[in-house]
Amino acid sequence: MKLLSSLRTFLDFVFRRPRVEQEMDEELRSHLQTRTDDLERKGFSRAEAERQARVEFGGFERYKEECREALGSRLLGEVVADVRYGLRQLRRSPGFVAVAVATLALGIGATTAIFGIVDAVLLHGSPYRNLSQLVNIVAKGPPDEGDNISPGDFNDWQAQNQAFSDLAAYKRWEFHVLTGYGEPDEVWTFPVSTNTFHLLGVNTILGRSFAENETQVAVASYEYWRGHFAADPNIIGKPLALDGKPYTLIGVAPPGLEFPDPNVQMWIPITLGAAERNDHERRSLHVFARLKQGVTLSQAQAAMDLASRRLAMQYPKTHAGWTALVEPLTTQDISTLRLAILTLLGAVVFVLLIVCANVASMLLARGSTRQGEMATRAALGAGRLRLIRQLVVEAVLLAGLASVVGGLLAHWGLTTVLNLLPKYILVETQALHRISINLPVLGFTVALSLLTGIAVGLLPALRVSNLNLNESLKQSARTSGPGAARSRLQRALVVFQVALALVLLVGAGLMIQSFQRLEATPTGFKPDHLLSVRVPLMSFKYAQGSQAAAFYQNVLARIQAIPGVKSVGMANNLPFTGFSLAVDFPPPPNAPGGPARTAFVYVRCISPGYFQAMGIPLKKGRDFTGADNQRDAPCVRIVNEAMARRYWPGEDPVGRQVPGACAKNAPALIVGVVADSKWGTLAGQPDSEMYEPYAQHPFASFLVTFAIRTSSNPTSVAAAVRHAVWEVDHDQPVIQIRTMENVISESIWRQHMSASMLGIFAAIALLLSAVGIYGVFSYSVTQRTHEIGIRTALGASRRDILKMVVGEGLLLTLIGVGAGIIAALALTRLLASLLYGIRPRDPLTFVGLSLLLSGVALLASYIPARRATKVDPMEALRYE
């Protein structure tokens, strides 16, 4: 109770201070009145009694201070007074405040932006309840047999389970055509057990999750609900159609739920018939479970080993040699992003260090102008700790103002980062789509501003507060020992800034060079004036064979007739779209390695006109014709040069046979050879590719994409292309309409993001270094006005003064550049291992960026040096 009472009293003093002060004053006066009355009763006159009581009590302020000390509020009061005084001091120097706040805002904003990325990707918490209890159960059998579970095994485990509180399953992802709301769309769904959301411990934010044995219902992901359904809360309960079948949207999942893959846009219930539930042969399910309370992973594994032996005895033909492994449920693999983000985090720490050094140097310079003020306060009884606290509070106030501006810069920066991401959903970008200025990021900004304020204010405060009162109070003492120490410290900070700036410049320069080389890599086709449009054919509506072929031939003819379209072709997948189809078949008998050696070859099903539309040159033979693009036409193929070199080195492949390339393992006749083109990444060498006419093996595919070459801006025909498809089938999705240049750009988004952000950080570092050098030498010229006046009076020319100041700047710059080169040589090798194609050592880059930094530093020191040459010696000496 005493603690609560003391706490209540302290809070009253903090938030109701005038009232508490009045109560203390009234209580003290009451005690004084009581003592006066006692003395008067003892025979003193009233006036003498009051005087004697006051003598005995002493000053009221002493007792008030003791009360404040007892309340623990004295320190708070002093801090409040320091804040008020600091605000008054900052208000008197608007120019200094503007420069310092802008400098700090750059560092705090950049660091906050990168922390926002770190929070979204590396620190994002799991949306699942008690993640440690969630496990995957995977099958392990003969090699190349996969790790899926049969529905029969899953049902047996559910019935005989002893280690798990519940088990659930999901199937491989599926693409469905969504109709019934807006334009037709392709939706990526996962069939899951109806108990999936309950097992994961996840609740929907709208509607509900699945009920037991429920079918023909769906739950949308939060991102898809916001995108396709425009965050419409009234969509719950509305009918939709997936592949023409009626479904009802019953719920919306919470943000960040990415189970089982980040791509998921919708969940639907698994439907297993009686025959499937008893099927122990076809392995089509992925199974996960939640451990019972107190059950360990090893105990669960022992239980599954027993279940596996029981199934092997019951079904020896299908389960002999199979076991079930229990593994922790893994979340998204972000290893490809982690290294790049940590590199950017290291770069932004360098920027923040430069900012701190810059502002600390400014505060040192400002502190010299307040030497008299600090000496006066010290002479009046202020201790060194009190002076340090005052100066640190002022620095924290600067950082607090900078955090507001930095937060706005961070918001702008994160928006820029999101604009660098691919427009279309890819697995590796899902974590980045969570980037936002949320409460943890705001908390980080507040903490960062506090620590930055203390960091930039403490060192100058220690220097400024180290006073020699006699020297400081002499008005004629222009330079003293502590001032010289501050000058040396400022020069050390300049060297530090230059070295860090050069490290960032070299890292960014190498990264940008590598990105430019990658961006300029030939693709093997002409991406300009080329539009790609994906038209995922609805397999439920178009049967494999003639129906699918007729649909695409009809659409191709309509697109070809659009004004401005020069040529059009289609393929089951285009380069750089993230999809590919590879087959494994043996090479011809005379190929290196012999006929028994097999290899992967990438296969594309294309229409006649594809090579013309893509701009892929035909090297030998002929292109596919309309006659080839028939179901019953002779089986023909076209290969690229990489495949020709690999399978027929030094020979002409045209007219040769590819064994097993056609239906029923029949051979295919090679009729042409085309130039190599890259399909997956700009880095590396082209792979072996083989092209076949689509109509010889027609199928309904979600990957089919049109390549449309135009005579003008490709996007100008987008609406006409969409209309051409809908003339054939208005329920057909037409998605991912983008230029081929954008497709290629999106394939290297990570390199683009890393190079762009490192370039921005390097530019900031260069600017801050220039500002820091200018500030130090501007202050130095001001402090050395008397010395410069004497030199001029003794005959020094303006050129001599200029050489003196600029020479000092050059010396500090060269020292910083030397230290930066040593650090950069050590760190760029690390960058080479973290980033993409970066050269660990490039002498031209080191020399060029060193010269750039030296030039900027010399310019920054030249400006105050020019001012020094205009010093009037008579005025300087008279001032002294």
Image (cartoon, rainbow, N blue to C red):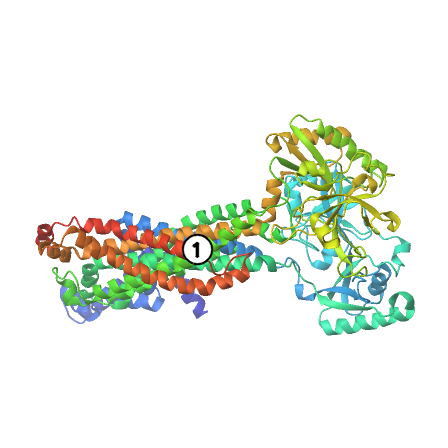
Amino acid, disc 1: Thr
The one nearer the camera, 286 or 466, is: 286
Horizontal side, residue 220 vs residue 68: left or right = right
Image location of residue 219, percent across then percent down: 72, 47
Disc 1 target residue: 845
The one nearer the camera, 405 or 616, is: 616
Image location of residue 815, percent across then percent down: 32, 63
Image location of residue 335, percent across then percent down: 60, 60
102 up-or-down from 563: above or below: below
Q: Residue at x 19, y 63 (%)?
A: 375
Picture quadrant where residue 555 is located: top right
Picture quadrant where residue 701 is located: top right
Picture quadrant where residue 725 is located: top right
Q: Is residue 606 visible?
A: yes
Horizontal side, residue 454 vs residue 379: left or right = right
727 up-or-down from 375: above or below: above
The one nearer the camera, 90 or 99, is: 99
Image location of residue 590, percent across then percent down: 79, 57
